Amino acid sequence: MTATPDGARHRLQRAHGARYATILSTAAALPKRRVTNADLVEHLARAGAGERDKLAETIGKLEAATHIRQRWWAGDGVASSDLALVAARRAIAAAGLEPTDIDLILLGTDSPDYTTPSTSVVLQHKLGATGAGTFDVGCACASFPTALAAAAGLIATNPALRHVLVVGAYMMHKLAADDDPTLFFYGDGAGAAVLGVSDTPGFVASAFQADGSYHDRWGIYAGGTAEPASVEAVRAGRTNVRFIERYPPEVNHEGWPRLVRKLAADGGFAVDDIDVALFTQVRKPSIELVMEALGLPLERTHTIMEEQGYTGSACVPMVLHDAREQGKIRSGDLVVLVGSGVGFNQAAAALVMP
């Protein structure tokens, strides 16, 4: 991996005296129960999803298409805020801070503890961050880059903000039917980052795109105002997460490169200046195709879906933390994060690691 060239570094500089957000620390959390693909076949068979041989064939095809070999599931009585709490505590400790030092908490998830109140306020209470305000970001797996960009903007414009905690949490397997083969994708997890203040970027740029015409393809379609929860809805499975229709591959294969190029243009750097590009961890071959389309070598990305499954709203901070832990991200590296969620929403953020 090469450091970002000096010319590119100069292009990232802004006016003297400006206030920027920078990442002080990252962390991640997984629950205790490991569920291999073989375990999943047995789970689905016991739930009446089909014959073991046919289920094994289906799961085998999904593994070949995604490279997901296992995932981790939380037990009964564990909520999204509980996994978020573990990641948050680790990130705060790694930054050398206490929960009372946090001024604001942003939590991204589409598997919240409740419809309302927000999961971020539950996390604030469990964490003991008594001086922090909170809000949730709810654009599925694009939530973390979106929340990161929002936090950076707030830090840049509000001198009272010193430390912002940004968390992504995911526990979608609890919102799926026991006999649903799409359980294959759902791994539970949480990732967190603490942002602080710097006089140099830090956070460089963000970019967003969406297409709401896909909103009815994958989601939970009862339990809100469009269809309030009812006995009929529960019996019909409409309060569970449901895969209705496949997204065209070009949503990510063309959408991710377009978003990265927009991010580079808006941020004043070249695509080749990117040291590490990290993407939603749902399908490894998609990441390989996108890296090729961007002209970036595979050494400049990192994946965790093989061992951790698809952790949705949490996968971007989790892969960021893992890449840092593995030494793939170093101080001074220009890192791009791209999240893609049902609906669909896509968001990207560029930052220079301190």
Image (cartoon, helix red, strand yellow):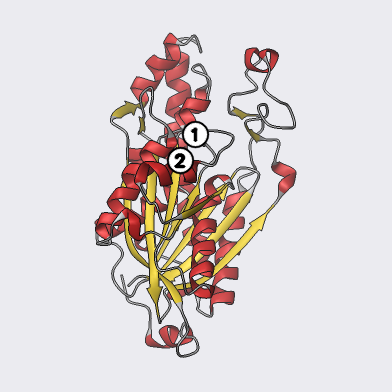
Front position in the image: 325 or 133 = 133
- In x, y percent, where is residue 89? 30, 49
Identify the element where label 2 is drawn: helix
Query: 124 above or below 35?
Result: below
Tag count in the figure? 2
Q: Which residue is mark 2?
A: 122
Look at the image and tell me in which quarter the N terminus lies: bottom left
Residue 145 located left or right of residue 249: left
Comes first in the chain, label 1 or label 2: 1
- Outermost residue, bottom direction? 16
Quarter of image, res 329: bottom left
Evaluate if marks 1 and 2 touch, with contact meaning CB atoms under 8 Å apart: yes
Q: What amino acid is found at the position of numbered circle 2 in the picture?
A: Val
Distance, label 1 to label 2, CA atoms, is: 8 Å
For the question of whether residue 301 can be seen, the reply is: no
Q: Which mark is residue 113?
A: 1
Name the residue: 38% across, 87% down.
6
Label 2 CA crowd tier, 10 Å (few <14, some 14–19, many 20+): some
For the question of whether residue 139 can be seen, the reply is: yes
Q: Closer to the camera: disc 1 or disc 2?
A: 2
Front position in the image: 93 or 314 = 93
Name the residue: 51% across, 13% down.
49
Name the residue: 37% across, 78% down.
4
- In x, y percent, where is residue 304? 35, 46
Quarter of image, res 347: bottom right
Q: Which mark is residue 236?
A: none
- Outermost residue, front direction? 130
Label 1 CA crowd tier, 10 Å (few <14, some 14–19, many 20+): some
Query: 134 above or below 336?
Result: above
